[in-house]
């Protein structure tokens, strides 16, 4: 995966130049702190698969009922919850998946 300081600098320059062009303001010379967070940071800090910040792709085959199920088919009594499961990404759906998973577990008890 290509995530280097050189590449980050290149994108910073593109973004800041465009911002200055569109706003007609000198922004770059007024920056007092700059930090980037890229693919390698997601891998190192969050053990994220291939540095993916969002999770699954928003494709038709990974939406709605095609998302991973709440209960593991392979491991008995293993349940999942969160943005990568049903019903999907975002805070409200993640909370709903937790509620749904807790209801599944309560049925087993």
Image (tube, rainbow, N blue to C red):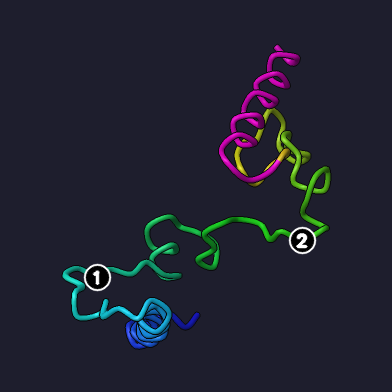
The residue that appears at 78% across and 50% down in the rendered structure is 63
Give the numbered dot on residue 34. 1
The residue that appears at 60% across and 39% down in the rendered structure is 82
Which mark is first along the chain, 1 or 2? 1
Asked if the stretch drawn in magenta spans residue 96, the answer is yes
Give the numbered dot on residue 71. none
Considering depth in this image, is 47 or 76 the residue closer to the camera? 47
Q: Judging from the image, what secondary structure is the residue with disc 2 in?
A: loop
Residue 70 picture location, percent across and down:
72, 35
Name of the residue lying farthest toward the front: 24
Determine whether, in the image, residue 15 is placed left or right of residue 76: left
Determine whether, in the image, residue 78 is placed left or right of residue 91: right
Judge depth for marks 2 and 1 and give the one in front. Answer: 1
Determine whether, in the image, residue 13 is placed left or right of residue 73: left
Mark 2 crowdedness (10 Å alpha carbons): few <14, some 14-19, many ≥20: few
Determine which quarter of the picture holds residue 58.
bottom right
Mark 1 crowdedness (10 Å alpha carbons): few <14, some 14-19, many ≥20: few
The residue that appears at 74% across and 16% down in the rendered structure is 108
Quickly name the residue at label 2.
59
Name of the residue lying farthest toward the left: 32
The residue that appears at 39% across and 84% down in the rendered structure is 21
Determine whether, in the image, residue 80 is placed left or right of residue 48: right
Quick one: quadrant of the C terminus? Answer: top right
Determine which quarter of the picture holds residue 79.
top right
Asked if 46 appears above or below 97 in the picture, the reply is below
Residue 75 picture location, percent across and down:
71, 37
Asked if 53 appears above or below 77 in the picture, the reply is below
Considering depth in this image, is 7 or 11 the residue closer to the camera? 11
Asked if the stretch drawn in magenta spans residue 27, the answer is no
Asked if 19 appears above or below 77 in the picture, the reply is below
Which stretch appears magenta?
Answer: 88-109
């Amino acid at each position: 995966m290509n995530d280097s300081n050189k590449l980050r600098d290149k994108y910073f320059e593109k973004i800041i130049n465009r911002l200055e062009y569109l706003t007609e303001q000198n922004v770059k010379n007024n920056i007092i702190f700059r930090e980037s967070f890229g693919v390698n940071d997601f891998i190192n800090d969050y053990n994220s698969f291939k540095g993916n910040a969002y999770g699954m792709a928003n494709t038709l085959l990974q939406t709605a009922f095609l998302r991973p199920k709440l209960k593991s088919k392979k491991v008995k009594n293993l349940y999942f919850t969160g943005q990568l499961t049903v019903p999907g990404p975002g805070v409200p759906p993640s909370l709903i998946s937790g509620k749904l998973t807790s209801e599944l577990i309560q049925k087993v008890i």
